[in-house]
Image: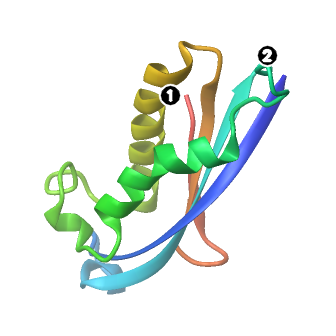
């Protein structure tokens, strides 16, 4: 089995609903997202997937969230924009894009979202 990981960054604001504490107030983070893909077969070039292509797959999701108040964006108008839900969102968006590109040869393993240098959430299925 092979796996590759790419990293992306974005800065956004959010606040947590149904939470009592500092994070119920609007605040921001410099997020770091790591997406890991897995697969058993390499392509003709000896790669699971070109890192550049995976970064391209992530770009629309990163750009959608970057410098925005996440609570104002779908699906986060109703889903709390916690690190856990952001990790699942990136996972689902990436999985959808990969399905169109690689016909199942490569699949997403997990997605990790860092809110700070020491705090992160991970989503996988």
Q: Is residue 39 left or right of residue 21?
A: right
Numbered tag placed on residue 98 in the rendering: 1
Q: Is residue 47 left or right of residue 15?
A: right
Q: Residue 79 appears at what percent x and percent y?
A: 23, 51
Q: Does 57 appear above or below 13?
A: above
Q: Is residue 67 visible?
A: yes
Q: Does 8 appear above or below 23?
A: above
Q: Residue at 64% across / 23% down in the picture?
A: 106
Q: Does 115 appear above or below 5?
A: below
Q: Residue 30 appears at what percent x and percent y?
A: 49, 79
Numbered tag placed on residue 109 in the rendering: none
Query: Is 58 or 14 nearer to us in this picture?
Result: 58
Q: Quadrant of the image for the C terminus?
A: top right
Query: Is 41 or 20 nearer to us in this picture?
Result: 41
Q: Residue at 44% across / 46% down in the picture?
A: 90
Badge 1 crowding class, 10 Å Cα cut-off, few under 14, some 14 to 19, many 20 or more, is some
Query: Is 68 or 112 nearer to us in this picture?
Result: 68
Check if mark 1's residue and mark 2's residue have beta carbons within 8 Å: no
Judging by the rendered image, the residue that carries numbered circle 2 is 41
Q: Earlier in the sequence, mark 1 or mark 2?
A: 2
Q: Residue at 68% across / 46% down in the picture?
A: 51
Q: Residue 7 appears at what percent x and percent y?
A: 63, 59
Q: Residue 58 appears at what percent x and percent y?
A: 48, 49
């Amino acid at each position: 089995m092979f796996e590759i990981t790419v990293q992306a960054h974005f800065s956004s604001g959010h606040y947590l609903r149904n939470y009592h504490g500092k994070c119920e107030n609007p605040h921001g983070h410099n997020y770091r997202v790591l997406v890991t893909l897995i697969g058993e077969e390499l392509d003709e070039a000896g790669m699971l997937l070109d890192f550049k292509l995976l970064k391209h797959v992530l770009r629309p999701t990163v750009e959608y969230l970057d410098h925005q108040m996440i609570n104002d964006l779908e699906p986060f108008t109703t889903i709390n924009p916690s690190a856990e839900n952001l990790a699942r969102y990136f996972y689902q968006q990436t999985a959808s894009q990969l399905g169109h590109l690689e016909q199942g040869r490569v699949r997403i393993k997990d997605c990790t979202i860092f809110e700070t240098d020491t705090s992160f959430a991970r989503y996988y299925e």
